[in-house]
Image (tube, rainbow, N blue to C red):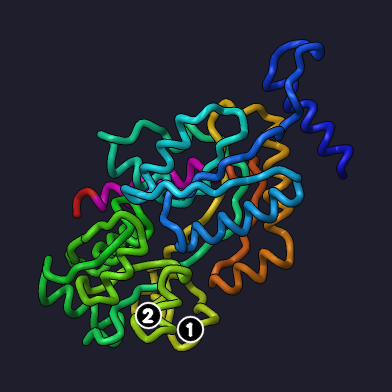
Amino acid sequence: MHSRRRFIQAAALAAVSGIGPAFAQPPYPSKPIRLIVPASTGTQIDVTARFMAEAVSRHMNVSMVVENRPGAGGLVGADFAARATPDGYTLLLAGIPLFLSRYLSESTASYDPVKDFSPIAMLCSSPLGIAVAADSSYKSLSDLIGAMKSAPDQITYSSGGNGSAAHICAVMLNDMTKTSAKHVPYKGNTPAVTDLAGGRVDFTCQGAGGILPLIEAGKLRALAVTNDRRWDALPDVPTTAEAGLPEFNLTGWIGILAQAGTPAPIIELLSNEFVRAAGTPEFKAFCDQQQMFVQSQDHRRFAADMPRYEAQLKRLAMLARQG
């Protein structure tokens, strides 16, 4: 295994340098790798990044540093990563906001989510929880929808910014229920959840990592989970189908990408490393704790799915713009 990895590293070196052996650079990786997280610390995507950085850096014997660049629903971090040199030393941990932020903010986004990135590996998927403050009068999803129908544009929801999973979840909820809750974007999911607990907005849609601690602390209450499987940590909370919306199913994903033009041997090496880490019992236990599901794919399968994600999320972005 180690000899094969050294061979791939040598091939990556040749691809990167493009010059003869006499002027060869150190084999990849020969310096720390940055893993850009387009979200604030403590969020589900952030803790996933830190788990992966530790696991992969230990196995590759190289430092992998997590760098948080939150803002604009993931746009800030993705835009920064897209402009980095395609040499394998700046990676992006991303999810559906990679597409949504781009299509919701075309005037400021400089990257194309398909053309400007090379998929490395899909890691996991995660449904969202629709939550309200613990003292909210909305005891069920039907209560919340009823309020949204009776008071158009008066019920508010928080998100980590335009294009975030929370934003698109509420857009889908508006679309399916013919309602018009008002979007209140924040710079990151943490303040979005904090203000919900403080009663400054009416609801949000977040991954388990963002809301479970506050649910356990008695500050939030979950109304529904956005896929066809309940969270193990909240066995009494229904799925959106069980709560009366059988066609509502939204599952986010988390994956690793590099810049387009990154040498193929480096993509292959990194893909193997991240897929290996995603296949360990430790990652399965981590995902269980975070109420996520392991969904590892190598760079080939991940790349094949990217056009489908783009088509689906462009439509959702269009709905978000209309709303």
- Quadrant, the C terminus: bottom left
Horizontal and vertical percent position of residue 29: 71, 35
Question: In the image, is 19 to the left or to the right of 220?
Answer: right
Instruction: Provide the secondary structure element on which disc 1 rests.
Output: loop
- Numbered mark located on residue 234 in the image: 1
Question: Which SS class for mark 2?
Answer: strand
**Vertical relation: 175 (above or below) 137:** above
| Residue 224 coordinates in the image, percent (x, y) | 38, 78
The answer to whether residue 233 of the structure is visible from this angle is yes
Horizontally, residue 230 falls left or right of residue 100, namely right
Residue 317 lies in the magenta stretch = yes
- Residue located 18% across and 63% down the image: 182
Q: Quadrant of the N terminus?
A: top right
Q: Amino acid at mark 1?
A: Leu
How many labels sit on residues? 2
Q: Cβ–Cβ below 8 Å for labels 2 and 1?
A: yes
Nearer to us in this view, 37 or 205: 37
Give the dominant element type of the magenta stretch: helix, strand or loop: helix
Q: In the image, is residue 242 part of the stretch drawn in magenta?
A: no
Q: Earlier along the polypeptide chain: callout 2 or callout 1? A: 2
Q: Is residue 159 left or right of residue 230?
A: left
- Residue 284 lies, with reference to residue 135, above or below; the image says above
- Mark 2 residue type: Ala
To which residue does mark 2 refer?
222
Q: Tell me how far mark 2 sits from mark 1, CA to CA.
A: 8 Å
Query: Which residue is drawn at the image coordinates 42% and 53% (left, top)?
Result: 39
Residue under the point 43% across and 51% down: 96
* Residue at figure coordinates x 52%, y 43% from the top left: 92
Label 1 Cα neighbours within 10 Å, binned few <14 / some 14-19 / many ≥20:
some
Residue 70, position as x, y percentages in the image: 38, 50
Q: Which residues are magenta?
A: 306-320
Neighbor class of circle 2 (other Cα within 10 Å; few <14, some 14-19, many 20+) is many
